[in-house]
Amino acid sequence: MLSQIIAVTSVNLRSLRERAGSSAVAVIGIVGVVIVFVGVLSIAEGFRSAMKTVGDEDSVMVMRAGADSEMTSGMNGDHARLIQDKPGIARDAQGPLASPELLVIVDHPLRRSGTGANVPLRGVQGRAFQVHKVKIVEGRAFEPGRNEIIAGRAASRQFTDLTIGSVVKWGENQWTVVGIFDAGGSAAESEIWCDAKVLQPAYRRGNTYQSVILKLASHDSFDQLKDALTTDPQLNVTAIREPEYYERQSQTLQTVIRSIGFAIAGLMGIGAVFGAVNTMYNAVASRSREIATLRAIGFSSVPVVISVLAEAVALSAVGGIIGGLLAWLAFDGYQTSTMNFQSFSQVAFAFAVTPSLLAAALAYAIIMGLAGGLLPAIRAARLPIVTALRQL
């Protein structure tokens, strides 16, 4: 049986050049599906990667209890100071490594389209540079008490007038861009930073903040800190590790993008399957006498079925590989931005065509090939031997 399968399958594959036209139709159909599949899902992968790399496991975000994002959180300055006195926080000669922060959304045009977008403007204090994983790569940091801002590298690329020396007007202030910072490609690069004490009066926020970012004394200090915060009757706050917070912030958009991607790929996949069915039916029809001859000299129907399926899988695999390569060349690293529905702010990120995504696309292509080759394979196995041999 195995020798028959190998023999029939090898004959099938060697004859592909004789059916190059119809085979190319099936391959091109699968290439198109794979490009769309990878292209759409690479958006979700890139967004997830940008959000996942924000912060580190030893940083904790403290917000008002019940808040699902910084935008729905809030606390006064006294509570922010009380939070910084809790045990489990890293300290140095200057005090606790803590950064009370205020986040507002400003309307600013995108560089490519010129349309307005919600850009996060974060008010921080000097300790923020020791708490967050950011570094100034152009210009300098803002000076406390001055209307100066620094822009994330991604924000500088995606939005207009965010280069060093530019002046923009938000709230009741005019702001001068004095620096560009890098955050390792994370979503933090979509933000603009300034002095919190300058941002508060600009938006009439008084002495309030929306979160406090803390550096843990050790990786195991989280439970100690969380217990101290949640059991203090003066506070009504919750604590969460930074990576976990930003991972949650990306879930809604990831779900939406993946749902759209699978829906589009599914609809296109149906068309690709019909193309594969047509191609394989033509292949069976053109080889009906050959198949009948093999059956007449003792070959069973199983090798015939497997040979047709193997041809369909080979064509789909070629289409999957070509489509994956084209999608990688076209989309991987492409810079864009989108609205994060949970924070209502624009997030700049790069499309990410990952190995796992390419593997999933190849598997999908092979499934389409198997689906398209199944009915023609059954027809080939049931082909009447006498009828086919009369054509000789």
Image (cartoon, rainbow, N blue to C red):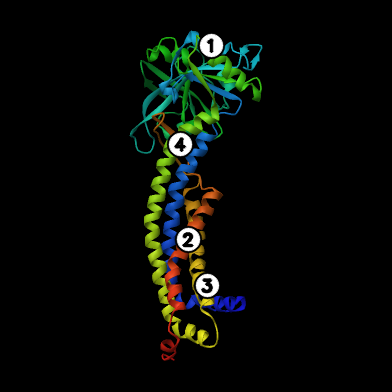
Residue 25 makes an appearance in the image: no
Dot in front, 2 or 1: 1
Tag 4: amino acid: Gln
Question: Callout 2: few (<14), some (14-19), or many (20+) C-alpha neighbours within 10 Å?
Answer: some
Q: Which mark is residue 251?
A: 4
Residue name at image x 49 percent, y 38 percent:
48
Q: Which mark is residue 232?
A: 1
Dot in front, 4 or 1: 1
Question: Callout 3: few (<14), some (14-19), or many (20+) C-alpha neighbours within 10 Å?
Answer: many
In this rendering, would 119 be left or right of 217?
A: left
| Residue 99: % across, % down | 54, 17
Mark 2 and mark 1 lie on one chain; the one further toward the N terminus is: 1
Residue name at image x 58 percent, y 14 percent:
228
Tag 1: amino acid: Asp
Residue identifier under label 2: 367
Residue name at image x 61 percent, y 25 percent:
58
Residue identifier under label 3: 306
Tag 2: amino acid: Ile
**Distance (Cα) linking label 2 and label 1:** 57 Å
Question: Callout 1: few (<14), some (14-19), or many (20+) C-alpha neighbours within 10 Å?
Answer: few
Mark 3 and mark 2 lie on one chain; the one further toward the N terminus is: 3
Label 1 secondary element: loop
| Residue 271: % across, % down | 37, 62
Residue 46 makes an appearance in the image: yes
- Are the residues tagged 4 and 1 within 8 Å (C-beta)? no
In this rendering, would 304 be left or right of 270?
A: right
> In which quadrant will I find the N terminus?
bottom right
